[in-house]
Structure formats: C-alpha cells, structure tokens
Image (tube, helix red, strand yellow):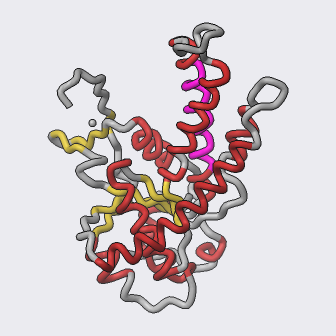
Amino acid sequence: MFKGFKVDLYLKEDAIFEKFYRIGIESYEQYKSEIKKTLDSFLFHDGSLNGSKIQENWFPDLNFDLFISHSHKNQKLAIYLAGWLESRFNIKSFVDSCIWGNSEDLLQTINDNYSWSSPLKETYSYNQVNFASSHVHMMLSTALSMMMDKTECLFFLRTPQSVKPYKDLDLTDSPWIYAEIAISKTLRENIPDRLKKLPLTESRKIFASADQEKKLKINYNLDLSHLVFLNYETIFNKWAKGKYNNKFEALNALYEL
C-alpha cells in the first residue's frame, strides 16, 4: 500500500447516488460471487480444511487499486463510492464487506460439519464454535492484510457509524475496523513504479516519513494520524474536476491533494 486517506463523506441518496450505487453493486456482487466460489473449492479435503490455501486464495485473481474500509452500516455509501470511482476514473475498489458474508457462510459450513455437541445435531458445542471462529477470523485477518498490501491506497470512511469521538480520541467498537486501520499503519510503503520516476513534492516527502438487551461492548483507540483527510470538497470539487488520461494519472493527482 502506498497511501491512506480518512474520508468524511455525507451524501443524499438521490437519483445520482442511486446511479453510481447500481454501478458499484454490480461489481460488488460479481466479486463476492467469485470469492465464494474460490472458498467453496477449499472447504473440505480428506475431512479437513486447508487453512493456508483458504487464506492465500480467499481473494482469487482479482486486482484492485483501492481498498475501502467502512462500517457495515455504511455499506451502501461504500458501494456508491466504488461505483463512482470506477465510472469516473476506472479505479477498481475492493469493498471490505465483500467478504463478511462469505466469512459467515464459511463459519456456518464448518459449524454444520464439525461443531455439533452430539450426534443428534441439536446444538453446537460452545468450545467447538469458538475454535472454528478463531481459525476463520485469523484466516480472514491474514487475507485482508494481503489484499491491503496489494492495493495502492486505502479509503477509510470516517463516519459517526465507524468512529465515536471521545475527548481527544477516536474510538471504534468494530474489531475489524480497528484491525484494518492498525494493519494500514504497519504495512510496508510500496511506492508505485510510475511515481519513483517523478520528483518528490512536499506532500509526498511528508508522507514518506449496536437495544435494551445487555451486550458486550468493547471500544478500541483508533489512530488515524497516518491517514490523509478527504471530504466532499477535496474529492468532488478538486480531484474529480481534473482532466486525466487514465486511472494512474487520477491516482497521482489524488496523492498530491
């Protein structure tokens, strides 16, 4: 990954929003289907699961330019943004919720095959379910790290659903958002070859350096200091107004905002 952005974006769901959402959902469903087919091919072999194969191939031969991290409550906004980026710049976005449903399907299949507490298959074993969950979540976290490392940049949708400000802290109750932001901070900086040939500008020099029931709630401190701030003005009134010959020129311009 080369660069990350925290994106404050609030959009009215009007006809234009729906237009780009439809473009995004078409790609989203296609990617999700391809990921599911790949996972299904590694589910059971000789009575066991090949965890390494699953995490290595969780995301099949799919190439993306940008990784969109978001709260599940902002899924529609994330898909809209992916559709707009594809339509405007031909930038391919990986929307992280593409895989949440598939991870739950994988966990359900494992539990249905291995986690029953008795041969009658009436209830799951608590210990077996926890054991399966720990493996699936570990594989998912590793696969997400690999995908983030392959993409060129990250958009984190910083919304009231994903971040809860507390004094001078940003908090999140999503372990997956916490994990993705932590991963984005520790990933190697992978400068695209095309940018290595360009003189460093000042901006690139700087960069180079869920009701009434009682529920378990855990909050994590979210360090967003390494992400560059974007909002509607910078995305739509600055970046989108430029004239670019291809997606790489558009991405180069994004890094200079």
Q: Position of residue 225 (x, y in %)?
A: 34, 51
| Location of residue 122 (image quadrant) | top right
Q: Residue at x 61, y 36 (%)?
A: 106
Q: Position of residue 170 (x, y in %)?
A: 26, 43
Q: Main secondary structure of the magenta part?
A: helix
| Residue 132 falls inside the magenta stretch | yes
| Location of residue 222 (image quadrant) | top left
| Residue 145 falls inside the magenta stretch | yes
Residue 141 visible here: no
Q: Nearer the viewer, residue 37 or 244?
A: 37
Q: Residue at x 36, y 48 (%)?
A: 71
Q: Position of residue 42 (x, y in %)?
A: 75, 39
Relative to 128, residue 219 above or below: below
Q: Position of residue 137 (x, y in %)?
A: 55, 32
Residue 31 visible here: yes
Specify start and end residues of the magenta stretch as a single range.
131-146
**Left or right side of 58 for 172:** left
**Left or right side of 143 for 237:** left
Relative to 193, residue 126 above or below: above
Q: Which of the image's four quarters has the C terminus?
A: bottom left
Q: Residue at x 38, y 48 (%)?
A: 72
| Location of residue 177 (image quadrant) | top left
